Image (cartoon, rainbow, N blue to C red):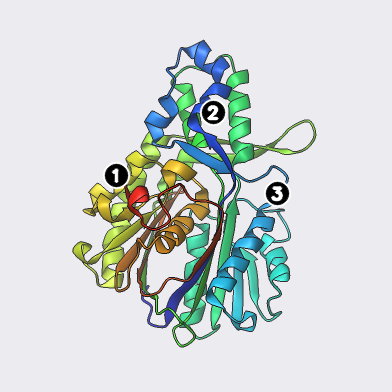
Amino acid sequence: MKYQNVCIEGLGYCLPDEIVTSTEIEQRLEPLYKRLRLPEGRLELMTGIAQRRFFPETVQPGDVSIHSARNAMAATGIDPADIGALIHGSVCRDFLEPATACRVHHALGLPQDCVVYDVSNACLGILNGAIQIANMIELGQIKAGIVVGTESGRHLVDNTIATLNDSTNLSRNDIKLAVASLTIGSASCAMILCNKELSRTGNQLIGAGVRAHTQHHDLCHSIAGKNETGVGNPLMQTDSEKLMAEGIATGAATFADFLGETGWSPDQIDRTICHQVGQTHRRLVLEKLGLSLDNDFATVQWLGNTGAAALPTALALAAQTQFLEAGQNVALLGIGSGINCVMLGAQWQTTLVSGTGEMPAGMEKSGALAAS
């Protein structure tokens, strides 16, 4: 996919206030750790994730998505009348139906002649939505669109902890399937794309590559169970080691397509933003693609894995902290269970970002902390 008329105009994000450390999670897992004689510090050591954040328990994904989208609209100054598509792209949603996008569309006061729907594709939903909006813009069907999503990991983490503590027949090997569930955090991000004739930034989308290695669809499963009150108790099982290996292989195959679509060589890529899974995954992906870790921006160590919101939020923070500079080629390297891979290339010029929520100290002016 190649683009000549599309710009990534701006971003809006929301970060939760509540911080939960990996040490605190291990303290809650004391019955399991004692039973299996697991060493403290294991979770952070295995994942590189020191903390993650959670939105309040009563907050729905749509509540936060509305806020993120408003932030993006405020940052860009886009005329609501020019928005021709609103896509909600996170795994988390308010209801199975109607689409959470309907509520967000109404709250934003967007036009009625607007395409409105949800996209769900594991950690790629927001990027998939961005491509769909870009295609509509490139075809001349719409002037601009918003893709937004909010991931809320509290219930998955809480239920995983309860399940691990209550299951007395688990072995050390068994709990490997649950480690990924303990890395999940919460975040929200909105992206506005528009026709270059409407753009104030000139952040031109150059091209995109996609791959579907669906023979590996069974490596990560998330289900929404029910407790005695009828409230959802989500659970996720992940073969993390195999998913990482096959995901990296899928990424390498997609990268070759991506370079062909953008016309770039690896040494022409100035900045990268990867999906935020863990530090080992990040290092191995970049090594496989022949890209420098120094040019990559990461949030996983302090936000955890925030699903479909992870990469867009990292992009917003990279831009806001001036890690992205005018004239740089930026590669967005997304991957999700399934296994699917989406890579977008853009030439960055001007940053229009508005966010809610505090970043770690020392990160406000430079991406150095996040890139370490």
Three-letter residue code for mark 3 = Val
Q: Residue at x 57, y 63 (%)?
A: 148
Whether residue 122 is visible, yes or no, is no
Asked if labels 1 and 2 touch by Cβ distance under 8 angstroms, the answer is no
- Marks 3 and 2, how far apart at CA: 21 Å
Q: Are marks 3 and 2 in contact (CB under 8 Å)?
A: no
* Residue appearing at x 63%, y 46% in the figure: 55
Q: Earlier in the sequence, mark 2 or mark 1?
A: 2
Q: Position of residue 203 (x, y in %)?
A: 39, 75
302, above or below 105, in the image = above
Of residues 276 and 235, the one nearer the viewer is 276
In the displayed structure, 186 sits above or below 104; it is above
Residue 25 disc label: 2
- Residue 126 at x, y = what percent? 52, 61
Residue occupying image coordinates x 49% and y 37%: 51
Outermost bottom residue: 197
Q: Nearer the viewer, residue 272 or 128?
A: 272
Task: Give me the residue at 60% from left, 37% from top.
Answer: 156
Give the mark nearer the N terminus: 3 vs 1. 3
Secondary structure beneath dot 3 equals loop
Tell me how far mark 3 sits from mark 1, CA to CA.
34 Å
Near mark 3 (Cα within 10 A), the count class, few <14, some 14-19 or many ≥20, is few
Which residue is label 3 attached to? 59
Query: On the rendered structure, is 350 left or right of 149?
Result: left
Q: Quadrant of the N terminus?
A: bottom left
The amino acid beneath tag 2 is Ile
Residue 306 location, x and y as percent?
A: 51, 47
Residue density around tag 2, few if under 14, some if 14–19, many if 20 or more, within 10 Å: some
Secondary structure at badge 2 equals helix
Residue labelled with disc 1: 283
Which amino acid type is shown beneath numbered disc 1?
Arg
Image quadrant of residue 32? top right
